[in-house]
Amino acid sequence: MPTAEINGHSLFYREYGEPSAPPLVMVHGLHGESGDLAPVAERLAESFRVVTPDMLGHGESAHPEEFVLEDQGHALNGLIASLGYGSAAVLGHSMGSYVAAQAAVLEPARVSKLVLVAPKAHGLTSSSAAYAERMGFDLASASARDALEFMAGALWSPDTSDDRRTQILLSLGSDPASPEEKAAVERSLAGFDLRPHLGGITSPTLVVSGSGDGLNTPEMGREVAVSIPDFQFRVYEHSGHMLPYEETDRLVADVTHFVLG
């Protein structure tokens, strides 16, 4: 799989669809990796050239000892430029939504359309860390699958069956990062606050939240949406935090129409 050198760091990415199709860059969530987005990327590749990077501290990309959300935003913009695009549509899920919004803040013209799925505007820690702390769970040493199983009550809609949850979890990769590398990712999000800057985003933006999301609630999504000048806000009634996998058909249809419409 290809990599790009961005600001001295290697960024691994996957590609889907025809190179001549309109570009859509998709950004994964916390402690995830680009392959996690494959079920959605493969569907969207019917209309787009989809690129899914491993962000800094994740997957096959560089794992710096110290970095912040702004570094992630610069890396994402740098990847779009390195692919030869003046601008591209960008979709981010959970942590990926913070990265996508940060990229649009840093270089508004680089992001042609912005889709933020299960976002929030600020946090003292990651949403997962905050929930784990409340519940007394050691997230840093847990595997990705164990962490997802622990946080089931915050991640899923009640409408998503146990069989469907298992199917989705089996489709996700495991995070090979060490506890130290995971801790560096957590530090990168400590105290981030996009609220003062969201008004500078110039791209049309679609914000989508799941009604059953216990990590980044619909109220948090609305706070993001109304801070952006040109926004649409939707709540998916049959989704939780795992919205891209719980209501894939609806998300693919909405993103396709929003970006190309």
Image (spheres, rainbow, N blue to C red):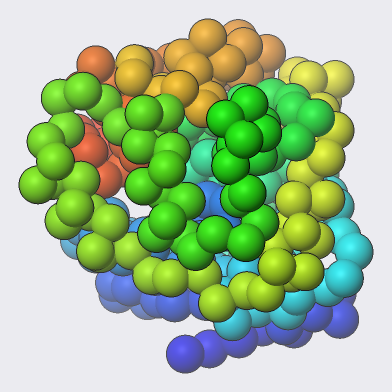
- Looking at the picture, does residue 27 appear above or below residue 42? above
Would residue 70 be found to the left or right of residue 175 on screen?
A: right
Residue 32 in picture, x, y percent from top left: 51, 61
Q: Residue at the location (74% across, 26% down)?
A: 122
Residue 260 in view: no
Q: Residue at the location (43% across, 38% down)?
A: 151
Would residue 214 be found to the left or right of residue 246 on screen?
A: right
Q: Residue at the location (66% across, 56% down)?
A: 140
Residue 228 sits in which quadrant?
Answer: top right
Residue 22 in picture, x, y percent from top left: 39, 59
Image quarter hosting the C terminus:
top left
Q: Count the numbered circles shown.
A: 0
- Looking at the picture, does residue 46 appear above or below residue 159? below
Residue closer to the observer: 173 or 180: 180
Residue 102 in picture, x, y percent from top left: 73, 41
Specify the farthest residue to the right.
66
